Amino acid sequence: MKAEDRQRKKMATSKQKKNLAMTMATYFVDRGSIPTPKEFNLCPKRPRLIKLITIRKIFGSWSAMEKYTRSFCANELKAMNQEKPNALEALKAKAAEAETEGANGENI
């Protein structure tokens, strides 16, 4: 076995997984959702120096990273889940206001 082959087969350390999971959890909370790998690649606001290939090297796949991040950073991701209903309620309130107004902006 060549030295290059041995280097490729090295597994990521636990510390690397934890650091990347924390970074990704922060990104997911800022974004408000967990993107698909394609969306992540195209996102201009993704964490610096983290590409899809980096995630695959450390976790093996996007889904493995997602599962690990959900379990390891559950407390951080709770904030993301709590923000969604509030935004939905705000949209419902705006829609209800729009329905009560007439064409000229006065109440019906």
Image (cartoon, grey):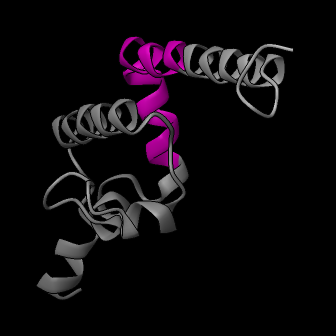
Q: Is residue 66 magenta?
A: yes
Q: Nearer the viewer, residue 60 or 35?
A: 35
Query: Eyeballing the image, is 53 above or below 68?
Result: below
Residue that appears at 54% across and 57% down: 36
Quadrant for the N terminus, please.
bottom left
Task: Report whether 35 appears left or right of 23.
Answer: right
Residue 96 position by quadrant: top right
Residue 99 pos. (x, y %): 83, 23
Q: Is residue 76 magenta?
A: yes
Q: Residue furthest right?
A: 108
Q: Nearer the viewer, residue 10 or 86?
A: 86
Residue that appears at 56% across and 21% down: 87
The magenta region covers 64-83
Residue 58 position by quadrant: bottom left
Q: Nearer the viewer, residue 71 or 95?
A: 95
Residue 47 pos. (x, y %): 20, 51
Residue that appears at 48% across and 63% down: 39
Query: Eyeballing the image, is 87 above or below 39?
Result: above
Residue 13 pos. (x, y %): 20, 44
Quadrant for the C terminus, please.
top right
Q: Nearer the viewer, residue 107 or 92?
A: 107
Residue that appears at 38% across and 52% down: 59
Q: Residue furthest bottom?
A: 2
